[in-house]
Amino acid sequence: MSKEIKSVDYGLEKIFEGAQDFLPLLGTDYVELYVGNAKQAAHYYKTAFGFQSLAYKGLETGSRNEVSYVLKQDKIRLVLTTPLNSKSPVNEHIVKHGDGVKVVALWVDDARSAYEETTKRGARSFMEPIIEQDEHGEVVRAGIYTYGETVHMFVERKNYKGVFLPGFQEWKPDYSPSSVGLKYIDHMVGNVGWGEMNHWVKWYEDVMGFVNFLSFDDKQIHTEYSALMSKVMSNGNGRIKFPINEPAEGKKRSQIEEYLDFYEGSGVQHIAVATDDIIKTVSELKSRGVEFLPPPPQAYYDDIPRRLGVHRDMMKEDIAELQKLSILVDADEEGYLLQIFTKPVEDRPTLFFEIIQRMGAKGFGAGNFKALFESIEREQQLRGTL
């Protein structure tokens, strides 16, 4: 672990003392993906990832331009949206980017204020505040653009008792696979183009009042062939964390460059979802067909006790079981964490998921970067994109 990482004080008061309070965020409300076939994508996320059916909007509910399926697992809500005609902006997005995250919706107490505060600080408007109503009450929503064509939607639902949003109806099909134990969104990572990371770091500081509490450069995140730089942004209460990556010069094409080429621009690289029992969750995901990155070599697992340091005695998991499932382990001053990364969940090598279990650690697995990158590079080599 580098001196820079060791010097970080992970105490929340220290990390977030610089965060401004003009934009209080209560949590992640939902994540909306634009996909080519929402009906089939919903079946995949239910079957493979254990999401439950929640709500639906489509022709049957009066929506003439798009259809959306809403899935839920504990505090996570995914919205899968597909256009119903070729002229839809949703269709244009899919043609360019493929399936991917369009909206990262943030739960707020006052959507109008959130919109006003961010736009006057330089945010580009996606949607002015609108009031959506039905028999269950009203929701206020407003949106701004962040990197690429990605949107932050502010959602105020304190006066709403419906299943999701006005315009949606409850969706209760017969098919309902069990949960795999996913709890909430831990963080979401964005990939941006060459030289753009510091621009978006400043944007989150100035527009959203976030703070940069961790930074990694290409000396820390590299392999023999590729490298990247990353900075982690967080809001004042620490509930929302957005690492931002950009590529760095290397001998070959990095995973960030591969993403930017195939997504055709900046966007969300992966969604990290938390579990309380990663061994049980990953075992279940594998049994349902979810594919993960290949495991690191034996030496990685032999070195875990040394890398855990003072936390080795508190570790409850069996290293042999972690190795069997290819789960990675890292530690910081506060504790340790366990994490694993899926392969891309669509044909373009873009969006993937991280499964993470925190045992006190507040970092992002810096000690795993080399092993993770080498696994990704082996996949890139198979795809012919390294």
Image (tube, grey):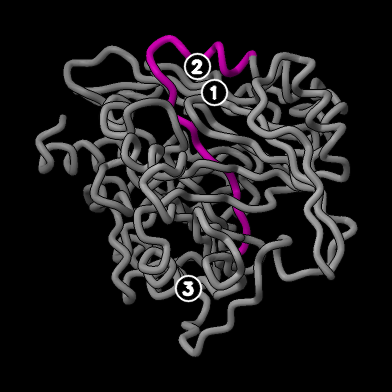
Q: Residue at x 48, y 23 (%)?
A: 230
Instruction: Using the rendered view, name the quadrant where residue 13 is placed.
Output: top right
Q: How many numbered circles does the render carry?
A: 3
Q: x and y percent of residue 76 in the render?
A: 61, 60
What is the number of the mark on residue 197?
2
Would residue 193 be counted in the magenta stretch?
yes
Secondary structure state at the residue bearing disc 1: strand
Reading the chain from its start, which is encountered first: label 3 or label 1?
Answer: 3
Instruction: Using the rendered view, name the quadrant where residue 233 is placed.
Output: top right
Disc 1 + disc 2, Cβ < 8 Å: yes
Would residue 179 be counted in the magenta stretch?
no
Q: Residue at x 78, y 28 (%)?
A: 16
The kind of residue tagged 3 is Gly
Q: Which of 150/133 is in front?
A: 133
Residue placed under numbered mark 3 in the picture: 50
Q: x and y percent of residue 51 in the render?
A: 51, 71
- Res 27 visible: yes
162 over 128 or under it: above or below: below
Secondary structure state at the residue bearing disc 2: helix
Residue range in magenta is 183-202
Q: Of the residues tagged 3 and 1, which is closer to the observer?
A: 3
52 over 94 or under it: above or below: below
- Res 5 visible: no
User: How far, Cα to Cα, is label 1 from label 2?
Assistant: 8 Å
What is the number of the mark on residue 155?
none
Q: Residue at x 71, y 14 (%)?
A: 122
Residue placed under numbered mark 1 in the picture: 231
- Toward the bottom, the furthest residue is 174
Q: Residue at x 9, y 35 (%)?
A: 384
